[in-house]
Amino acid sequence: MDKRKSLPGPNDIHREILPNGITVLTRSNFNSPSVVIGGYLDAGALFDPDPKLGLADFVTSALMRGTKKRTFDTIYNELESAGASLGFSSGVHKSGFHGRSLAEDLPLLLTLLTESLTTPTFPKVELEKLRAQLLTGLDISAQDTADMASQTFDEILFKDHPYSRPEEGNHQTVKRITRDDLVKFHREHFGPRGMVIVIVGAVEGAEAVKQVKRSLGAWQVEDQKEAPALPPLKMLKKTVRKHHRINGKSQSDLVVGTNGPMRRDAEFMPASLGNNILGQFGLMGRIGDVVREKAGLAYYAHSSLSAGLGPGSWEVNAGVNPSNVAKASELIVGELKRFVDDGVTPEELKDSQENFVGRLPLSLESNGGVANALLNIERHDLGLDYYQRYEGLVRDVTREAVLNAARKFIDVEKLAVAVAGA
Amino acid sequence: MTDSHTEITLSNGLKVLLKEIHTAPIISSWLWYRVGSRDEVQGRTGISHWVEHMQFKGTPQFPANLLDKAISREGGLWNAMTYLDWTAYYETMPADKIDLGLRLESDRMMNSEFKPEEVASERTVIMSEREGSENEPLFMLGEVVQQTAFRVHPYHHEVIGDMADLRTMTRDDLYNHYREFYVPNNAVMAIAGDFESDKMLARIRELFESIPSGKEPTRVAREELQQHGEVRLSVEGPGSTSYVQACYRFPAASHPDFFPLTVLDSLLAGPSNLNMFGGGISNKTSRLYRALVDKELAVSVHGGASATIDPFLYGITMTIHPKRKPEEALAVLDKELKRAQEEKVSKEEIARAIKQARAIFAYGSENITNQAFWMGYAEMFATYDWFRTYLDKLAKVTAKDIQRVANEYFKPQSRVVGTYVPQDGKVR
């Protein structure tokens, strides 16, 4: 089977912008009788006022709690009776949705998506049930060392920037949110402008677009608000450490890191390949080798890039015994220093490139994988032929480019170091 | 999922299942060994999982630092997992690269080194893995519930093992366990993807058939005693959220009652997703969600069984609403179970459960790794036929069957109920 032909591209992706501004992307796959839908709207947590942090999250969680035509129970009864799923979630910039069903139930999925997006009723009784669930979720998260280390890391790295705020809010802010807040947020921010929907699976592209037009083509929202501009980022002037205490935990989570590129930055691909060498390739890269394999300090120790529409982060995560936090932290900083001082070897870069090229078909074998790829293309304006050009983009990266990206973002004297645990 | 496959046992006892799927240029190869935490005695709990870790530490031909890089360089995904009854290793790779995965598995079936220094560094890694699990209230609760439910049968301990044993097991303990169970006549190889079966089989013969078979490993088989009366227990720990786990004794996956119980699980708690790769669906209109979460006694409820060789457990886990008591939620659970015992379910409810299972099957079939997984997984507790006829068996389930199994398996006197009592908040 030809590898290149199996990758999505202009030859098999159908893209269309509806008159009301919704962008539709589809790709057919008749190997399994199922379909996946995914998408997003410009309605993320950036719009949350500080005293009501968690508002976007509350709204997305409440969209399926009742619509003009259906109750919460009716919506889920229809969905679950068909073995289908649909859910909404919020991020910083966007609110997203994801669903799947047998192909025969795509019309049902689109009907429920449309009603939830356009005519949610936010019933009071349901909102109070949901609020208790959200608050319990916050309680559970407060006991999760990985969640708390990550939150503490964001507070250090993105001080005074919206990215420092937890999208789920906190007890005080979630308790403060009223039904009127939800209604207002939905009215002002949910609309077709900027909305993207992808459909992948056992349906012809033209038929899928027709179904979206029928469901969402008439949706119009006046005065849909523009997203606020991001303030400039305040860079760290020295290494900042914070320990978030959670008593009674046998393991602590450690995050060491710094800023990273945006997805559209030229440094993104070199930084990704470099990051793969630093903390992913093989068994968690150089970091895994030093912290897990040689020192036996952690079950997991790896690095990751978080690159989106705004400034990103470049971080190393490890779960270690509380008595080993300092030692693990020292080893990680040592590896970061080696990475920015010496860069990567030709062999390491070649391995990393082979890995990126080789694993691409694996990430695209399921409908969900292709749906994510199409969303990625649209969100970051990568071009419909991105995955067919991908191998060339990967192979064009040089050692110098990796080193330059590493030096642009990583300064071992100016790191954010967050620990959560005992 | 497509149905045709090849099944053959080599002269050394290695069972091979092959399934051609030409939808993507990918092959997924799985090697399953009939060894898991059930094959462990006190003093060596966790040994099967630790041996699995050591299988990544290299052979003379594939030293540790080359092994992982070689697979990654080819764009492959590989991993391993240990459970109650089995240990499995897999590589999913671009189709033209799978030979590396096959060579690696053939080599480490008998040539892993278990160097003392590697055993030493892995000891602390596994202790760290266990410490990470101990951070989770549901791990702490589940461990005690499981050990209470099984006093005699070796299903009684967690796969990761007890800390005391992780501290004291020796390199020789590990190596002997490896040599005893890692023999071709104790293994099943399952491969799915973009290949021609004849050629693949020839290559497997080349790589595996010369590995000598070993003595048939003896599996620990101490039948659990009948439970006479409900057991309730509590575990205290950090946090402010209470959890209740009610566990009932379920039959082996090969038992005919497993299927009506699967339909009942779907009605009670939403359909369980047995796929390793491929998502499930929500459970917001299941009976327990409506009775417990909708009525604000719990903020979530989940149920699930495992497909095992011997009878294991069906667990219902409730995250208790902050304003309610665990006992209140338990009383409502009992009421719902009683309803299932006293009233026949409707045909529509059964049809719904079957449609849900059909959809989950379709989602799983999008993924070649998942299809290869199923061929070997089903062999670990039954045969691949168990999986191929799964939907047909569900379709034959009647309302009468469901009522019967509800009465037979959901008896309060044979359950263990555990409560996690958070120490940072009040449990009223």
Image (cartoon, coloured by chain):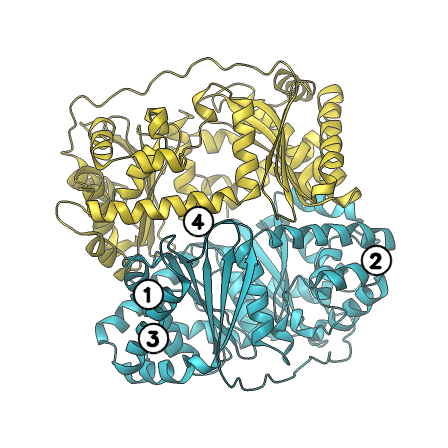
Residue at mark 4 to residue at mark 3: CA–CA distance: 38 Å
Q: What hue does chain B carry in this figure?
A: cyan
Q: Are marks 4 and 3 in contact (CB under 8 Å)?
A: no
- The residue at which mark 2 appears reads as B113
Name the residue that disc number 1 marks: B288
- Is residue B382 rendered to the left or right of residue A95? right
| Res. A221 image quadrant | top left
Marks 2 and 1, how far apart at CA: 50 Å
- Residues tagged 2 and 1 counted as in contact (Cβ below 8 A): no
Residue type at numbered disc 3: Leu
What residue type is disc 4 on? Ser
Respond whether the residues carrying marks 2 and 4 are from the same subunit: no
The reply to whether label 3 and label 1 mark residues of one chain is: yes
Please tell me which of labels 2 and 1 falls first in the chain. 2
The chain coloured yellow is A
For the residues labelled 3 and 1, the Cα–Cα distance comes to 9 Å
